[in-house]
Image (cartoon, rainbow, N blue to C red):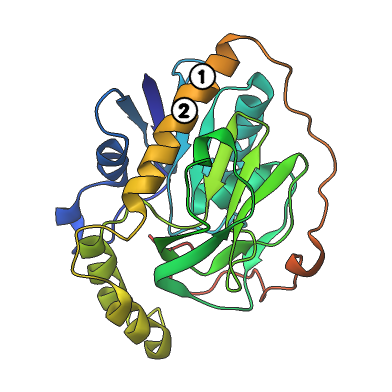
Amino acid sequence: MRIGILETGRPPAGLEQHGSYGLMFERLLGPGFETVVYPVIDDVFPAAVDEVDGWLVTGSRFGVYDDAPWIRRLEAFLRQVMAARVPVVGICFGHQILASALGARVEKAAAGWGAGPHEYDVLERPAWLEAAAERFTLNAMHQDQVLSLPPGARLIASSAFCPIAALAYGDHAISFQAHPEFDNAYERDLVAMRRGAVIPEEVADPALAGIGDEALAPDAANAALWIRRFFTEASKGAAAGLPSFRLDAPRPLGDCDFDGASAEAEKGIRCGQ
């Protein structure tokens, strides 16, 4: 299966030894998946939505509200992908821009920075998630959050810190706020680099203490399995020519549609990379 990785960010200077985001997702997907990287952050886009079997949108240091032409172009491309029912997975910034492209509100959340391992409650079990436990833990690194449900989206996972933590759109798109592709070595180095300068010490220190000695976050391997299973099953639906995804007006999620901090960009990183 051929997956196009829409690369919206890169590791910060000094952490290049961990590999590019494209490489991290290549490792995550593993055997049976061929990856093609499109550095959309450099305004390099695919020629068509169907030139691969599925799309994966990475994390980024940008916010979806930033005034960068490639961000608006990516939103338009994702709307085309959704209308064509080509399978797509969004991670962190990818989670946010997919929701934003479909009308959701994305801002810096009042909760502030999330870093280190975070636990999420599973609220619904699509077929690709059916074997999951009631909760899962993945590494997080973000300040922005999706603050309202986009039309047609179903809330799959949530936490007190991040109410809209994972979404599913029909059977052809899913997204996670957390980072299954961030191994513990990269997460540790990233938090340590940002401690004090970007992430407050009172957030960074517990995050560093919570990162285990194992290679991966507790459920990173499970999340990799979920994503692989999703791509495999969703590609069958796309090949069958099922009806197109509807683009309706965005709808709030009650108490989860909360007011975040100002979306005005400030110096630093907002979605973690």
Q: Nearer the viewer, residue 60 or 153?
A: 153
Q: Nearer the viewer, residue 13 or 231?
A: 231
Q: Residue placed at 64% from the left, 65% from the top?
A: 163
Quadrant in which the N terminus is drawn = top left
Residue 106 picture location, percent across and down:
66, 59
Q: Regarding mark 1 in the picture, which secondary structure is present there? A: helix
244 vs 126: above or below: above
Q: Which residue is mark 2?
A: 231
Q: Which mark is residue 235?
A: 1
Q: Residue placed at 36% from the left, 84% from the top?
A: 206
Residue 255 picture location, percent across and down:
78, 69
What residue occupies the far bottom of the structure in this picture?
Answer: 202
35 vs 42: above or below: above
Q: Circle 2: is it few (<14), some (14-19), or many (20+) Cα within 10 Å?
A: many
Q: Circle 1: is it few (<14), some (14-19), or many (20+) Cα within 10 Å?
A: some
The three-letter code of the residue at mark 2 reads Phe
165 vs 39: above or below: below
Res 165 → quadrant: bottom right
Q: Regarding mark 2 in the picture, which secondary structure is present there? A: helix
Q: Is residue 196 visible?
A: no
The three-letter code of the residue at mark 1 reads Ser
Q: Nearer the viewer, residue 55 or 174?
A: 174
Q: Is residue 128 visible?
A: yes
Label 1 close to label 2 by CB (< 8 Å): yes
